[in-house]
Amino acid sequence: MNINTKTILITGAAGFIGSNLVIRCLQDCENVTIIGLDNVNDYYDVSIKEYRLNKIEEVAKEYPNSKWHFIKGNIADKALIDKVFADYQPDIVVNLAAQAGVRYSITNPDAYIEANLIGFYNILEACRHSYDDGAKGVEHLVYASSSSVYGSNKKVPYSTDDKVDNPVSLYAATKKSNELMAHAYSKLYNIPSTGLRFFTVYGPAGRPDMAYFGFTNKLLKGDTIQIFNYGNCKRDFTYVDDIVEGVLRVMNKAPEKKVGEDGLPVPPYAVYNIGNNQPENLLDFVDILQQELIRAGVLPEDYDFEAHKELVPMQPGDVPVTYADTSALERDFGFKPSTSLRDGLRKFSEWYKEFYL
């Protein structure tokens, strides 16, 4: 499959991964039409979302052979989704719009049901009806899942072959539900779909609710940062450019439509991990972060880091380790994330200084 000249709908286009994906599509694909959809809500600082959208506009001007349309709206609005599909007839749909975050799901469950279940259902239904009356329909639905679906699995690295029936947060439960819903629609309506389990994505203009961003804000103010599980958490930190590269490769290769022995379609359905395949101890991560913040001039050279950290117990809904088995991604797409933690945190620190200071 070649995504040049295609019409691509990317939901969550003002989001961290979504905005970077739009920019890569504009830069690397020829004569594409990209429809970005986002409700630009205030779950976190809207100025970062506006910054990302401005970056997209700048890039879109540099690549006039491709078209960029932005629609402000909510995927939970069924009438809007149906209208977008009717007006633009997308060939590829990348659903990144979601309510993210484990801790927020404990206090604000409604947001997760609306965006992650109702919103995703609306996308699936629109994909289904894109085939009505013999139309060509959506060629590939790619959607965001999460490493959170692995819950408190003891076996590492996490493989997409593992059972993931015991989520430890509502957020994780909604993401597993997305995989199940997509499988049902792939089976019933022969819609090629691929779910991507992202592992702790970080980088410039990232989500301020992520730990590395919150740590930076607190260290700058002279506050104490809390490091959970007494620093014994391990995370498969994945730089955003690696995530986007993986998504782009997946977009280009939809699961094959096949007929089974029973004469019925075998669901053209796949799920992959996209992670760094190299979990880092949270204490080491924070140490590299403060070094890079000092290097970028965000923190002073004599900053007393030890005086500003506190080791605390685990938070409800959190897991001690995330670790991706990315062998399937390597096998099927010849790709493995490779950006080092220091390189990624250096780029974040430089962006932070430019944006805030």
Image: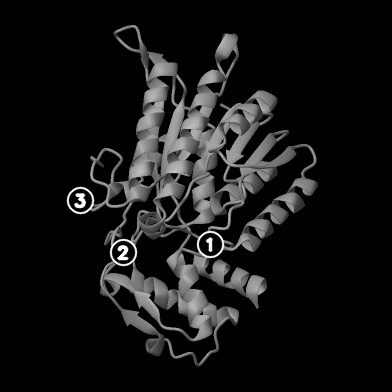
Q: Residue at x 41, y 83 (%)?
A: 224
Tag 3, which secondary structure?
loop
Percent x, y for residue 272?
A: 38, 40
Classify 10 Å Cα crowding around label 3: few (below 14), some (14-19), many (20 and above). few
Mark 3: amino acid: Lys
Q: Which mark is residue 155?
A: 3
Mark 1: amino acid: Gly
Q: Are marks 1 and 3 in contact (CB under 8 Å)?
A: no
Q: Are marks 2 and 3 in contact (CB under 8 Å)?
A: no
Q: Is residue 25 left or right of residue 94?
A: right
- When asked about the image quadrant of residue 285, the answer is bottom left
How many marks can you see? 3
Percent x, y for residue 195?
A: 42, 37
Q: Residue at x 54, y 47 (%)?
A: 244
Instruction: Return the residue found at the far top.
Output: 263
Tag 2, which secondary structure?
strand
Residue assigned mark 2: 234
Say which of 324 and 354 sits in front. Answer: 354
User: In the displayed structure, would residue 328 be above or below residue 220?
Assistant: above
Residue assigned mark 1: 203
Mark 2: amino acid: Lys
Which quadrant would the N terminus be assigned to in this image?
A: top right
Percent x, y for residue 313?
A: 25, 72
User: In the displayed structure, would residue 340 be above or below residue 192?
Assistant: below
For marks 1 and 3 on the same chain, the one whose residue lies earlier in the sequence: 3
Residue 222 visible from this viewpoint: yes
User: In the displayed structure, would residue 63 be above or below residue 343?
Assistant: above
For marks 1 and 2 on the same chain, the one whose residue lies earlier in the sequence: 1
